[in-house]
Image: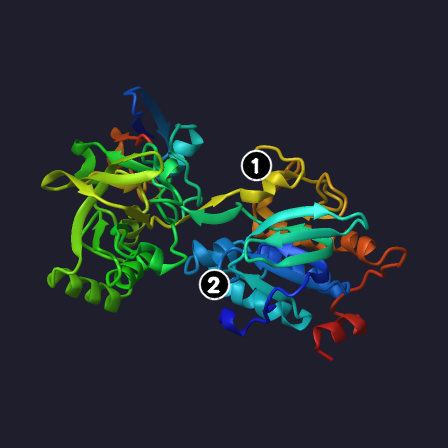
């Protein structure tokens, strides 16, 4: 399923009020939609990636997984697609390409969450299913790079105009590097594309266009690697590039490194939840964190005997949903039912 | 058993002995070799198990596959001897293998 087909919230007019916010749209976050849905809890799902599936979709979409009960072999993308199909009846709303930056408890015990996309949510429970953390651009381990970030070193480009008239160096060999090379070439004063080998992973037509620009002398294509940054304060002035021919000092105003994504715990660390070595300790009855109403399931949690398996996360989602019910519907008795035989569950699933 | 020597950036050596049939990354993790992170768990999806294969062993370990080359784009200070250790399957022929751990995985 393409992510375009998912229901999305539009605009940021006032907070979005809901029963549950799930942080992370990996397999465990997706299955949490299912388990919460069975007990009538509506969910919004937020993920920093622009597609559901988490690591399954980002790191190994084509690679086989062999330990999902009942599916002897399934790829990362297929299990994502199947989960999306399975949770469809529950109509969760997806907020993709957004990171939850703030999470705080309100006086009425609900939670307020804010994303970097400017959305605010007010929710009765929060489920952190953030796996290895949020995917963030890899920072090349070059001495002093932090000082230049945001002023001369950019991992993404918000406004093309910001780079007008600048000497731009793009590093990388995938689609991001190629797309930005094509996109910025007309506005940059000069543009150099640097890659470690003369072979590019990006879409063939982008590679072709880039090679045309290089042949016409409109960009410079260099094969090598950056070894050193030079500048003063937060302004980058030059970089040392090592190529087969030797070292070269290249004057640049802006450096755009595209080395893929890595997982960082990110803002979770600032939410006042107890952490232990970048994991969130939980109990094994409810999978609740140190904060009542905030649950953590999947790879991001820790408890004695924890295994980072998708199937363990599924189990955790089921138990979490039982506990979440008590908060969302206080005082209401929950009757345990099977999807095989319960007409009310089957109605929710839309199969009767 | 296969004997492998890991050399750290400070030139300290660690010799590990392991069953063939596992990957070089697994042998490193099993023996707590510092500097081999293997964030993705061996799926050739992250480039944090990067090693430099000693010159004398490069023929025997072979060249990276296309997928591994693509992933090496995400590593730092990539050299002709660079490999991802999760993609090197240990065999009896690799008994004595020597690899260097890079200064940084990222």
Closer-to-camera residue (A143/B94): A143
Q: Tell me how far mark 2 sits from mark 1, CA to CA.
A: 27 Å
Q: Residue at x 21, y 32 (%)?
A: B54
x, y percentage for residue A93? 63, 66
x, y percentage for residue A61? 44, 60
Closer-to-camera residue (A96/B73): A96
Closer-to-camera residue (A181/A173): A181
Locate residue A149: give its quadrant: top left
Q: Which residue is mark 1?
A: A278
Between discs 2 and 1, the one toward the N terminus: 2
x, y percentage for residue A259? 34, 48
| Structural crowding at the residue carrying mark 1, measured as other residues with C-alpha within 10 Å and reported as few (<14), some (14–19) or many (≥20) | some
Locate residue B14: give its quadrant: top left
Q: Which secondary structure, mark 2?
A: helix
Q: Residue furthest left?
A: A245
Mark 2 belongs to which subunit? A
Q: Nearer the viewer, mark 2 or mark 1?
A: 1
Closer-to-camera residue (B36/A139): A139
- The reply to whether residue A315 is visible in this rendering is no
């Amino acid at each position: 399923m393409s992510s375009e087909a998912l229901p999305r919230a539009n605009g940021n007019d006032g907070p979005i009020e809901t029963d549950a916010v799930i942080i992370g749209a990996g397999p465990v976050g997706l299955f949490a939609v299912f388990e919460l849905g069975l007990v009538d809890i509506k969910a919004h799902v937020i993920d920093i990636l622009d597609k559901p599936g988490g690591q399954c979709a980002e790191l190994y979409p084509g690679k086989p997984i062999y330990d999902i009960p009942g599916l002897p072999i399934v790829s990362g993308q297929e299990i994502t697609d199947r989960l999306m199909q399975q949770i469809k009846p529950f109509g969760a709303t997806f907020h993709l390409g957004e990171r939850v930056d703030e999470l705080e408890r309100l006086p009425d015990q609900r939670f307020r969450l804010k994303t970097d996309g400017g959305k605010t949510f007010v929710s009765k429970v929060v489920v952190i299913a953030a796996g290895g953390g949020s995917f963030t651009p890899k920072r090349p381990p070059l001495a002093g790079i932090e000082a230049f970030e945001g002023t001369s070193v950019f991992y993404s480009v918000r406004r093309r105009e910001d780079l007008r008239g600048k000497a731009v160096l793009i590093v990388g060999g995938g689609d991001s590097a190629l797309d930005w090379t094509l996109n910025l070439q007309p506005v940059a004063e000069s543009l150099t594309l640097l890659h470690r080998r003369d072979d590019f992973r990006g879409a063939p037509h982008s590679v072709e266009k880039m090679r045309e620009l290089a042949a016409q002398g409109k960009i410079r294509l260099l094969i090598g690697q950056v070894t050193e940054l030079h500048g003063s304060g937060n302004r980058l002035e030059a970089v040392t590039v090592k190529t087969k021919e030797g070292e070269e000092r290249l004057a640049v105003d802006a450096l755009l490194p595209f080395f893929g994504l890595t997982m960082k715990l990110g803002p979770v660390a600032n939410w006042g939840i107890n952490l232990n070595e970048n994991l969130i300790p939980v109990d094994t009855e409810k999978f609740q964190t140190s904060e009542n109403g905030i649950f953590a399931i999947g790879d991001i949690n820790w408890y004695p005997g924890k295994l980072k398996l998708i199937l363990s996360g599924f189990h955790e989602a089921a138990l979490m949903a039982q506990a979440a019910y008590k908060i969302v519907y206080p005082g209401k008795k929950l009757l345990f039912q099977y999807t095989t035989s319960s007409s009310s569950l089957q109605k929710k699933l839309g199969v009767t | 058993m296969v004997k492998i020597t890991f050399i750290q950036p400070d030139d300290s050596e660690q010799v590990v002995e392991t069953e063939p049939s596992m990957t070089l990354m697994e042998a490193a993790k099993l023996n707590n070799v510092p500097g081999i992170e293997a964030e993705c768990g061996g799926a050739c999806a992250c480039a944090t198990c990067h090693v430099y294969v000693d010159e004398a062993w490069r023929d025997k370990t072979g060249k990276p596959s296309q997928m591994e080359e693509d992933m090496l784009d995400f590593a730092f200070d990539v050299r002709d001897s660079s490999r991802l250790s999760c993609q090197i399957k240990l065999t009896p022929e690799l008994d004595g293998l020597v690899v260097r751990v890079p200064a940084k995985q990222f």
